[in-house]
Image (tube, rainbow, N blue to C red):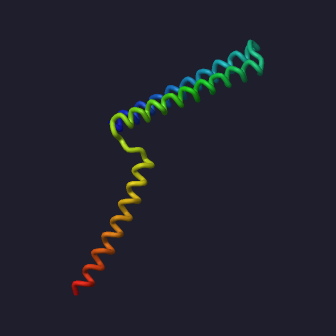
Amino acid sequence: METTFKNLLYAGIGLATEASEKIEKKVNELSKKGQTTDSEVKKIVDDFIKKTEETSSTVEKKFNEIIEKFGYAKNTEVSELRKKLETLESMAAEKAKATTVKVK
């Protein structure tokens, strides 16, 4: 399932990159032909960036919803659990060592 999510994410990034390249090419063509002004080009690019950021935010929210729905842990949660586990293992090792010393 995680592989599917990664593939979807990579596909989205690929589409965004392709769209960005096409827009850049089109803007350059229009600019060379004198059909657009620098301010129009800037507006087109700014609008594209704004829409891309909005879409990215939406995709990230949906991705997080899916992660939660299927019960996957986030990286931060896994890191916290690892730290707690290391602490507990250390405490258990110390307790075992103390018990061994008392038995002798």
53 horizontally vs 62: left or right: right
Q: Residue furthest bottom?
A: 104
Q: Which residue lies at the image location 39% right of the left edge and 36% below the top edge? A: 67
Nearer to the camera, 25 or 46: 46
> To which quarter of the image does residue 99 belong?
bottom left
Please provide percent x and percent y for residue 55. Answer: 54, 26
Please provide percent x and percent y for residue 3. Answer: 35, 37
Nearer to the camera, 4 or 35: 4
Does residue 99 sit above or below 42 in this rendering?
A: below
85 horizontally vs 49: left or right: left
Q: Which residue lies at the image location 56% right of the left edge and 23% below the top edge? A: 19
Nearer to the camera, 101 or 41: 101
Nearer to the camera, 54 or 27: 54
| Number of numbered discs overlaid on the protein picture | 0
Does residue 87 sit above or below 53 in this rendering?
A: below
Q: Which residue lies at the image location 30% right of the left edge and 79% below the top edge? A: 98
> To which quarter of the image does residue 2 belong?
top left
Please provide percent x and percent y for residue 26. Answer: 64, 18
> To which quarter of the image does residue 18 belong?
top right
Q: Residue furthest left?
A: 103
Q: Which residue lies at the image location 22% right of the left edge and 87% below the top edge? A: 104
12 horizontally vs 21: left or right: left
Does residue 54 sit above or below 86 in this rendering?
A: above
Please provide percent x and percent y for residue 13. Answer: 50, 31
Does residue 48 sit above or below 74 in this rendering?
A: above
Quadrant of the rendering where the N terminus is positioned:
top left
